[in-house]
Image (tube, rainbow, N blue to C red):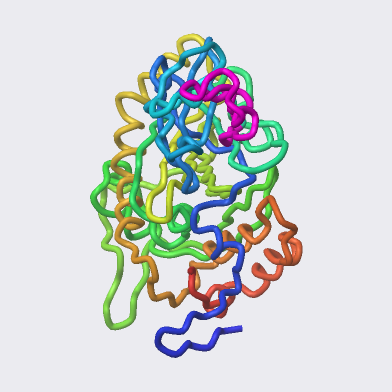
């Protein structure tokens, strides 16, 4: 059903309430924060899901605390360590247990300070895997890290390489871009080495289906490489050096993960669009290859550092980050047929971990969406905020 336009200044009620509310992310998940090598003897302060966190390494183990002393709000990241297993605020010497966050001493109030044990700073569960520091942003007991890690990372003889960068824009728009069916056929057609010799489709129709391990995946129903656009003429022009390639299978998974599987290979490109605040996200990209060892492993390292990192993760995906940065906070939105991929992602967000969703089971929703395609994406018009 199409929503009715609102009067000027009046907000419309979205059909995706959980998606709209998640401006700074879904909390009950593990997120990649930074490379393990980035946290050494000095504390590292970073923002995730609109919270400032300090990472402190002691005896090889990383601890994560809310980066603010509850006394006067001074960042704990400017503090120092006075005693093993603790961290001390630089302002008044309030000293917190790294494991629990409980105030163990207020140094400038003496050893019998009555405030001790009555104050604590929030701590976050931390894991280190694949050379990456992962932080659980929810409350309560976290699930195993493996619950939020794609199985491709856990397979034996796997090469995992990547790039982390900070980008402008909201994380939800970045995820929508990742799942967006239509943009690659035009945006990436020009200005990238990755598509210089690749024959790109002019248009296609897709359906989105539930896949294994919580993924939703795009499946192509029809495809065309050149068409007559009425009186405008043919498009795109035929270029003799362009060749068809195997292509890839695009999938999305909560909380913010893209998987681009290169069909016919054991290679994947993954990306986490980690919320930082309302207008920034941390773009964590991985090149993951299964079943490699010895010389083959060395070849993948060489391929990544001499070609894939620059061509794919920087130049090709740089076009995506450019569009997300340019997208206004309250954009006009009139969806068209290829946006069924975006609609499916928003439906998935309504089933995020946490409070029980009011939405119908995801499989039922996607099945209905598949039956209604291609009209479904057009009919389900709603604002994103």
Within the image, what quadrant is residue 135 found in? top right
Q: Is residue 366 or residue 162 the one in the foreground? A: 162
Residue at coordinates 50% horizontally, 47% vertically from top-left? 49
What percent of the width, then of the height, locates residue 194?
32, 42
Residue 153 in sight in this render? yes
Q: Is residue 336 or residue 57 the one in the foreground? A: 57
Residue at coordinates 47% horizontally, 35% vertically from top-left? 69
Residue at coordinates 34% horizontally, 76% vertically from top-left? 229
Q: Is residue 182 magenta?
A: no
Q: Looking at the image, how many numbered discs can be counted on the residues?
A: 0
Q: Quadrant of the N terminus?
A: bottom right
Residue at coordinates 39% horizontally, 29% vertically from top-left? 91
State the extent of the magenta-drawn residues as a range.
95-124
Q: Is residue 120 magenta?
A: yes
Within the image, what quadrant is residue 209 found in? bottom right
What percent of the width, then of the height, locates residue 293?
53, 13
126 in relation to 13, above or below: above
Residue 159 in sight in this render? no
Give the dominant element type of the magenta stretch: helix, strand or loop.
loop
The answer to whether 170 appears left or right of 100 in the picture is: left
The answer to whether 314 appears left or right of 116 in the picture is: left
What percent of the width, then of the height, locates residue 385?
48, 69
The answer to whether 236 appears left or right of 129 in the picture is: left
273 in relation to 8, above or below: above
What percent of the width, then of the height, locates residue 240?
26, 51
Q: Is residue 156 or residue 7 the one in the foreground? A: 7
Q: Is residue 348 or residue 301 the one in the foreground? A: 348
The answer to whether 86 appears left or right of 276 in the picture is: right
């Amino acid at each position: 059903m199409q929503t009715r336009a609102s009067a000027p200044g009046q907000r419309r009620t979205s059909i995706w309430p959980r998606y709209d509310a998640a401006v700074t992310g879904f909390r009950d998940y593990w997120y990649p924060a930074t490379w393990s090598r980035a946290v050494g003897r000095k504390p590292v302060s970073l923002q995730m899901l609109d919270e400032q966190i300090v990472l402190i390494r002691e005896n090889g183990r990383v601890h994560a605390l809310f980066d603010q002393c509850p006394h006067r709000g001074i960042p704990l990241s400017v503090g120092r360590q006075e005693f093993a297993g603790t961290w001390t605020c630089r302002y008044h010497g309030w000293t917190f247990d790294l494991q629990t966050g409980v105030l163990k001493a207020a140094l400038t109030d003496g050893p019998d300070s009555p405030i001790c044990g009555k104050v604590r700073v929030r701590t976050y569960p931390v894991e280190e895997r694949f050379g990456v520091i992962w932080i659980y942003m929810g409350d309560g007991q976290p699930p195993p890290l493996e619950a939020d890690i794609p199985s491709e990372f856990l397979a034996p003889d796997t090469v995992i390489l990547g790039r982390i960068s900070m980008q402008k824009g909201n994380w939800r728009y970045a995820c929508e871009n990742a799942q967006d069916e239509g943009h690659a056929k035009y945006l990436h057609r020009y200005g990238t080495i990755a598509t210089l010799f690749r024959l790109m489709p002019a248009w296609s129709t897709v359906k989105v289906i539930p896949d294994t391990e919580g993924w939703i995946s795009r499946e192509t129903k029809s495809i065309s490489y050149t068409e007559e656009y009425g009186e405008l003429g043919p498009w795109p022009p035929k270029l003799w050096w362009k060749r068809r390639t195997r292509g890839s299978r695009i999938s999305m998974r909560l909380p913010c993960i893209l998987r681009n599987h290169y069909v016919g290979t054991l290679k994947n490109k993954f990306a986490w669009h980690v919320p930082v605040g309302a207008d920034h996200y941390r773009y964590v990209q991985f090149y993951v290859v299964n079943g490699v060892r010895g010389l083959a492993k060395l070849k993948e390292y060489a391929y990544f550092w001499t070609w894939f990192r620059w061509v794919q993760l920087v130049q090709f995906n740089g076009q995506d980050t450019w569009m997300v940065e340019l997208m206004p906070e309250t954009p006009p939105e009139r969806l068209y047929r290829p946006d069924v991929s975006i609609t499916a992602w928003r439906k998935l967000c309504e089933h995020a971990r946490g409070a029980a969703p009011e939405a119908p089971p995801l499989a039922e929703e996607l099945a209905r969406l598949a039956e209604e395609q291609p009209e479904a994406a057009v009919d389900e018009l709603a604002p994103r905020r």
